[in-house]
Amino acid sequence: MVEGEPNPARPPPGTVLCALSDLTDPGTKGFRFREDRKVFAGFVLLFEGQLRGYVDSCPHAGWPLAAWEDRYLTREKDLILCGGHAALFRPLDGACVAGPCMGTHLTPWPVGLEGDQIVTL
Ligand code: FES
């Protein structure tokens, strides 16, 4: 894939990811999609009643964030944690507030609700 080209594995708008009831608040759930040899990884987050989605790639080194499946939050569940080198991100805007990529942001992955289903936008 050439840098800047859209990832063909990224699911199109309207793709159903899961039910809202599959998430606790706060809570997260990760998703991986494949198209041939390409992979798109993202996760959704419910925090203080607000829904967010982010691409599962740390702005520091591009590694996936979660060290364990679906566990993107710190033990206190107040920040998103990168298992790579322990960068911390605010849940609702993805801003890095500690670690080697301070001043950067997670890449948003727009998601929304259709009924009680979380879908890509
Ligand atoms: S890859 Fe996330 S902090 Fe280094």
Image (tube, rainbow, N blue to C red):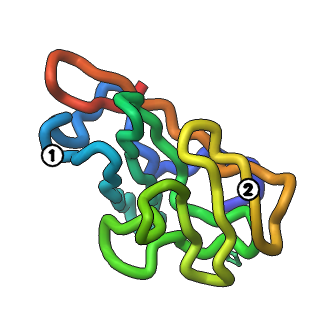
Specify the label residue 13 is tagged with. none
Horizontally, residue 65 falls left or right of residue 115, namely right
Residue at image location 53% in from the left, 72% down from the top: 64
Q: Residues within 10 Å of mark 2 (few under 14, many from 20)?
A: many
Q: Does dot 1 land on a helix, a strand or a loop?
A: helix
Q: Residue at x 49, y 49 (%)?
A: 8
Q: Residue 114, how many percent across, how many down? A: 23, 18
Q: Amino acid at mark 2?
A: Cys
> Residue 45: where, in percent of width, then height?
39, 45
In the image, is residue 80 above or below residue 121? below
Contact, mark 2 vs mark 1 (Cβ under 8 Å): no
* Residue under numbered circle 1: 22
Report the quarter where the N terminus lies.
bottom right
Residue wearing tag 2: 96
- List x then y, in percent, for residue 11: 38, 42
Percent from the top left, x then y, of residue 19? 15, 37
Q: What amino acid is labelled 1 in the image?
A: Asp
Tell me: residue 29, above or below residue 87: above
Q: Specify the quadrant of the image occupied by residue 120.
A: top left
| Disc nearer the start of the sequence (2/1) | 1
